[in-house]
Every structure is written in C-alpha cells, then in structure tokens.
Image (spheres, rainbow, N blue to C red):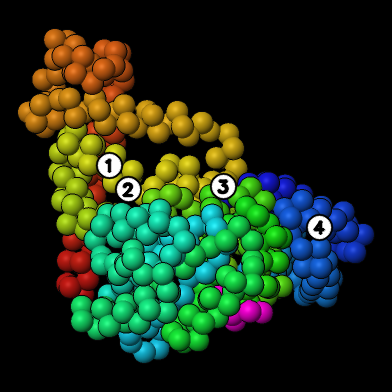
Amino acid sequence: MFDLLSSKLQKVSKNLRGLGKITESNISDSLREVRLALLEADVNFKVAKNFIEEVKEKSLGMEVIQSIHPGQHLIKIIHDELVELLGSKNASLELDHYPSSILMIGLHGAGKTTSSAKLARLLEKDGKKPLLVACDIYRPAAIQQLETLSKQLGFPIYLDREQKNVLNIAKKAMQFAKDTDRNVLIFDTAGRLQIDEEMVSELVRLRKFLKPQETLLVLDAATGQEAVNVANEFDTALGITGAILTKLDGDARGGAALSFKSVTRKPIKFMGVGENPEDFEPFHPERMASRILGMGDVVSLVEKAAEAVDLEDAKKLEEKIRRGRFTLEDFLSQLRQMKKLGPLESVVGLLPGGSEMTQKVDFQKSEKEFNRMEAIICSMTPLERRNAQIIKANRRKRIAKGSGVKVSDVNGVLKRFNQMQQMMKKMGRMQKMMNLVNRKVSKKSRRR
C-alpha cells in the first residue's frame, strides 16, 4: 500500500533526523524531495504545492522543544500535515434514524458490489441489521454476485430479477425491510464505464425517493487523480457524503487518497485492502499517515488481533505457558490465529518499520512455509501433537508422507517447536518468580 510514496518519504525522514538546526536552506532539498514524491504518487499538483508551503511555514516558525531533536520535530510536522491532508479524523457513518438507507454509487469495476457486502458485514458486527438491495438491473452477474456474498456472510438480500425499474425495487425493498425487521438498507446500484446523463438521472431519481442518510461513492484507488475528477462530477450531480477507496492494497502511489479530501471537501469513510470480507476497514487519517511514514499502525494491528483471537483460548494458553505445557496443538492453534489476521505482508506492514521490511522479505515464501508447517502438524495423531517426544524416525517418515513433504521438513518443524517450547518454559519460570516476588512484597507491606 503506497509503497512508492512510503519508501521516498521514509528516505527523506532519515535524512531529516540528522538536522541539528532548522533553516530554510537545509530543509529546501528535503522538501523538494517530498514534493516530487507527492507528484510521482499522482497527488494533485495544487494539493502538493499547498502541502509543502504549509510544512515549510510551520517548520521555520516553530519553537523546538529542547528535549526533541529539530529533525524529529520536522518529521512530526510532515506527519500532522499528512493527517490533515487525509481528512484529520475518522468520519463515521451518520445513521441518525432507522431504518436508514445507504446509496452505493460509482463507475463500473470500482468494487461497489463487494464493498456493499463488506460494509454490511461491518454494520452487522456493530449491532445493526443490514439488508442488501440489488439495484443493478443492467448486469445480471451483479445480482448473482451480491446474492452469493450475502449467503457467504449470512445476511438477507432483496432482489427482483424480473423488475426493470429501480424505484419499484426500492419501494418493495423498504417494505421487505419492515417485514423482516432490517434497519439499514444498502442499495447496490448500476455502474458505467463512464459518467453519462442517463446513469446520473436514474441515480438522481432514486436518491430523491430514498433520501438516503449516506451516499457513498466507491472509487478504485489505483486510478489516482482521475478518481478525484470522477468524485467531483458525482458530487455535483448527487451530493455525495463520503467515499470508499477500494484496491488500496494494490495502490503503490496513493494519489487518490491524498488528494480526495482537499479537492472534494468530502471524507474518505472506508477503505478496501484486499479481496476477503474482512479486508475492509474504517479510514483513519492518523493511522494512514503513520503507515506512509513507516511508523506502523499498532492500533489497527491490536484491533485485528482482538477480532481474531478467542479470549478463552488466550487464557488457556497463558495458563499452559505458566506451567510449561506448550504442545504442538497449541503451536498449531497459534499458526491458525496468525492466519486469521490476514496476509503476513499486511500484518508486518502495520508494525513500526514494517513497510521497509516488506520490501526485503519474500512473504510468499513465508506464507508457503506457514501452510507447510500447518500441513505437517495436521498429519500427526492427537497423541503426537500432545507429546512431541514420541515422534521418532518411523513416525516422522509417516508424517512426511502424509503431508507430502520431506522428512527434513518435519525435522525442521519439530526443531522450531522445541525452541519455542523452551522459550515458553523460561517465560513460565519467570512468571512464577515474579509472582513469588510480588507475594513477598505484599506480605512486607501488610506487616507495616
């Protein structure tokens, strides 16, 4: 995500850290590099120019706190300006009464249908009762796709394959929502290869009838500045309330994200970062700015972990670690929970310095290694997974054959497990020691 822009800005950041004093002459070259990085990322040239002027004005006029290095202070200014450029804060959906309507609009191929289903999933997790409404009467495959996604994710859909009038579909969908107690309707509308009068007039009629709380424009992030131009045209005709940027995982430049708010004055509300239903997140400007500058996004990583990890399982694992009873079954459980967090590359990218690491590590190879390890452990019997000591030569041959790998691969997994088991035992002993110290300190305190 934003690899090109991120690598260039991180290079500038490293150079800035060495500055002992901020002057116009010694930051001019760095700011020129920042400006070129923004332009190469397909950021609107006026937006890039204003960004540099703001950074320059604030950096030359700043009072540097003695405990903070001047270069670090300048990096903070760049970070804060990036946050402002991206929208300053997360803009949530404004669904002030129920049932509420969300109108999804955009060009053909931007990802409206998949974004509609992903948005429904997020709303359901938030306690809402979403209903998907298929209003793309021109592309039968869109209805079929939405129907498949609704079944996959487990919430209802309203569709009428015979109806060719979107207003009639909308009216019946509203009644269906009342009958089935659904409180948020998401209308997936038809897209076009380009904006045309017929398309816009149909959407205007639909919007006038629905009076939706949200009109969300779905944009392909990879189209850069063109996405912003499209947004302006849709906003003029329909008055959008915000945008969903899709395919951000494949966008190396970031021009659309960095230009959108400044040009349209409307917020980016959500972003699509992959093909899976869970690869859809609220857009947080501050977190995104930190990712771009290589500072990571630990908050998002913690949120992903909280969603993926079962608290009861985590407590059981903690107890096992304390007692030094970490088994291959626990190892397998940890592997599977890591996979729930998403692709390894995206997880590492959320760590501080992770974006730089992702350029050096072959994550496809690492993902294959994870899958191989999982297959090897799954080829073991429950007894073997609970007691790795019994896995001798003959058992290793059988496990290798069952998982389609070499015996050396099985040996490698067992070696890794033994290393992890030893580490877990040390952690358990350390925890016991800390508990003992705490009890002694507590006793002394009570005596006083």
Kindly identify the amino acid type of the residue bearing the numbered disc 4: Arg
Question: Is 239 within the magenta?
Answer: yes
Mark 3 crowdedness (10 Å alpha carbons): few <14, some 14-19, many ≥20: some
Instruction: Residue under label 1, please give it.
Output: 336
Residue for badge 3: 250
The first of marks 3 and 2 along the sequence is 3
Residue 213 appears at what percent x and percent y?
Answer: 45, 84
**Residue at 22% over, 41% down:** 333
- Label 2 secondary element: helix
Look at mark 2 in the image and give the residue it sits on.
Answer: 340
**Between tags 3 and 4, which lies in front?**
3
10 Å crowding of disc 1: few (<14), some (14-19), many (20+): some
> Which disc number belongs to residue 35?
4
- Amino acid on which disc 2 is placed: Lys
Report how far apart the C-alphas of labels 2 and 4 lie in the structure. 38 Å
Q: Is residue 224 left or right of residue 202?
A: right
Query: Which residues are drawn in magenta?
Result: 236-242
Identified by mark 1, the residue type is: Arg
Q: Residue furthest right?
A: 25
Q: Nearer the viewer, residue 356 or 15?
A: 356
Measured in 3D between alpha carbons, the distance from the residue under mark 1 to the one under mark 3, in whole angstroms, is 25 Å
Q: Nearer the viewer, residue 169 or 66?
A: 169
Q: Is residue 392 visible?
A: no
Q: Are marks 2 and 1 in contact (CB under 8 Å)?
A: yes
User: Which type of secondary structure does the marked residue at label 4 adopt?
Assistant: helix
